[in-house]
Image (cartoon, rainbow, N blue to C red):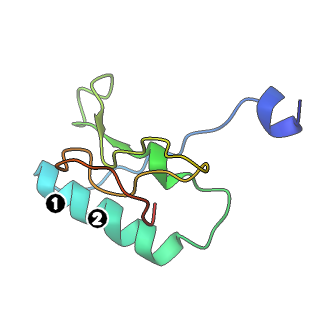
Amino acid sequence: MTEYETQPRWIVHLPTTLTSLDGARVLAEALRDSLGHVAVIDFGETTLSEEDQQFLRTRVWCDHRLPGGSRCGQRVDHPPPCSPGRI
C-alpha cells in the first residue's frame, strides 16, 4: 500500500455566499477549470451542500469509472452514455 492509501485524506470546505445549487455548480466548474492542474485536488469527488445541511451532499460530476481507468467527466445527471472528460 502507498502512503496515499494508508493516510487519512483531508477535505477543504469552502463556504460561499451563493444561494442556488446551479450557482454552486458553476463555481465548482470554474474552480476545476482554473485549478485542474493541481494534482492533489480530486475534482471527481466534488460535492455541494446547503450551509445548514452539510450532511446532505449533492455530487457535481458523474465520476463513473470507465474501461482503461479514466472517469466520466460529465455532470452527474447526464444522459447515457458516460464518456471520459476533464474532472
> Is any atom of residue 83 visible in this view?
yes
Extreme residue in the top direction: 55
Task: State which quadrant residue 24 falls in.
Answer: bottom left
Q: Which residue is mark 2?
A: 27
Q: Position of residue 42 (x, y in %)?
A: 56, 51
- Looking at the image, how many numbered discs can be counted on the residues? 2
Circle 1 residues within 10 Å: few <14, some 14–19, many ≥20: few
Task: State which quadrant residue 27 falls in.
Answer: bottom left
Determine the residue positioned at 41% across, 46% down: 46
Determine the residue positioned at 22% across, 47% down: 80
Image: 41 above or below 59: below
Left or right of 1 on screen, residue 23: left
What kind of residue is marked 1?
Gly
> Is any atom of residue 17 visible in this view?
no
Q: Which residue is mark 1?
A: 23
Extreme residue in the bottom direction: 34
| Rendered image: mark on residue 36 | none
> Are the two marked residues, 2 and 1, in contact with CB atoms closer than 8 angstroms?
yes
Image: 16 above or below 26: above
Q: Gap between marks 2 and 1, in whole Å?
A: 6 Å
